[in-house]
Image (cartoon, rainbow, N blue to C red):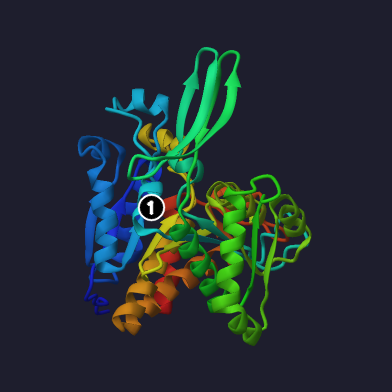
Amino acid sequence: MQKIAMTTPIVEMDGDEMTRVIWKMLKDELILPFVELKTEYYDLGLKVRDETDDRITTDASNAIKKYGVGVKCATITPNAARVKEYDLKQMWKSPNGTIRSILDGTVFRTPILIDSIKPAVRTWKKPITIARHAYGDVYRAVEYRVEQPGKAELVFTDKGGNEISRQCIYEFDGAGVLQGMHNRDASIRSFAHACFQYALSVKQDLWFSTKDTISKQYDQTFKLLFEEIYEQAYRAAFEKAGITYFYTLIDDAVARVIRSEGGFVWACKNYDGDVMSDMVSTAFGSLAMMTSVLVSPDGNYEYEAAHGTVTRHYYKYLAGEETSTNPMATLFAWSGAFKKRGEMDGLADLQRFGESMEKAALQTLQDGVMTKDLVGLVEGETPKAVSTADFLKAVRERLERLL
C-alpha cells in the first residue's frame, strides 16, 4: 500500500530505558511501514539532557509551540541515586514539568478500557478523566533544610524594593525543613478554561476539588477563579449541553469518586492530579493503560505515555532476557498525535490511521493476546501472555486488515 503522507512535522521526543526500546520497536512495526513519517526529533534521554544542561528540553518545548503537536516517550526524573548511576552534573528537573511550564498546559489522563478487565472499584462503569494543573505547587517549590534554631519568615518585596508583607512561618527550636510554593492567577485561569472547554468537548460533568477550608488563600484562589470563569464564560454552555460543574473539598471528592460510576472529568491541582491519575489508572487496570495529553491554552498538544521508564524490565532486556512490557500507553501517544496532526492539517488518511492503530490494539487485547501485566486482571477467559515484540506483531496483523 502507498504510505500515508504528512505535511507538517510532529515533534518527537525520545526517552529512557525500556520505554526507549519500545519506542523504536513500535515505530519499526506499526508506523514506518505505513506512514511517510515527518518528525522534528529531540533526544530527551537523560545523558543528552545532562550534556546539554537540559537545554534540549526547552528546545523541544518551543518546537511544540512552533508545530502544534508533539509526542513524548517516558523519561527519567533523576534522584540522588540516578545522579550517581548516570554520573550527572546535577539532579535535573522533570522534563514533563519543564514542558508543562513552558506550554502552560493542562494534562488530561483517561484510562483505556476493555471488556475483559473490570475496574477494581466495582461501581465504575465509565472512564474517569483526570485533569491535572501543570504548573507550580510542589513541582516549582523552593526548599531549605534547617539545621539549627531560628525563625523562618515569608517575605514579599515589590519590584520597587518595598517590603509589602512579612509573616512568621515558624520559630524552630531545632532541625527541620522548609518549603515555599507559588502559583499564578494567569496559570490557574488557563487551567480553568482548559477544563471547562474539555468537559464541553466530551460532554461530561466537571468536578473540581481543593482544600480551601485549610488553605484560605492558596487553595481558595483556585476555587474563586474557577467559580468566576464558570459564571462569566461557561454556565450557559454547560446548561445547554446538559452537564454540570461541581466543586467540593478534595477529601469529599475522593469519597464521591469511589462511590460513583465514572464518566466525568475530575480537575485537580498539580500534586493531587499526579497522585490521583495513578490511583485511577491502577484501579481501572494498569498505569500502562492510560492516555495522557497536555493541552495548552493556545491550542498546542503534547501526547505522552503516562507511566515511567520501566527500569526493571530494561535491565532484564540488557541481560538478553525477553520482556513483556505493555506498550499501550506509548501506542496511544503516537495515535493521538497522528489524529491531532491529521485534524490540524486536514489529512483524513492520517486521522484514520491513528484511529486504526487504536482499534487494532484494542482488538488484540479483546482477542486475549496481551502482555503479562494484564493477564492476571482478565476475567471470564484465559488470555495468552506474549512478549512486547509479539504483541506489537499481533497488533500489526490487525492493523493491516483494517487498512
Q: Position of residue 158 (x, y in %)?
A: 38, 44
Q: Position of residue 198 (x, y in %)?
A: 52, 72
Q: Is residue 339 left or right of residue 369?
A: left
Q: Position of residue 267 (x, y in %)?
A: 59, 60
Tell me if residue 344 comes above or below residue 144 in the rendering: below
Q: Residue at x 26, y 41 (%)?
A: 54
Q: Nearer the viewer, residue 344 or 371?
A: 344
Q: Residue at x 26, y 68 (%)?
A: 67
Tell me if residue 337 comes above or below residue 202 in the rendering: above
Q: Residue at x 26, y 58 (%)?
A: 62
Q: Quadrant of the C terminus?
A: bottom left
Q: Quadrant of the N terminus?
A: bottom left
Q: Is residue 346 left or right of residue 266?
A: left
Q: Nearer the viewer, residue 72 or 174?
A: 174
Q: Nearer the viewer, residue 244 or 189?
A: 189
Can residue 341 be seen by looking at this rendering?
yes
- The residue wearing badge 1 is 101
Identity of the residue furthest to the bottom in this view:
240
Q: Position of residue 145 (x, y in %)?
A: 48, 21
What amino acid is found at the position of numbered circle 1 in the picture? Ser
Quarter of the image where one finds residue 205:
bottom right
Tell me if residue 1 comes above or below residue 383 in the rendering: below
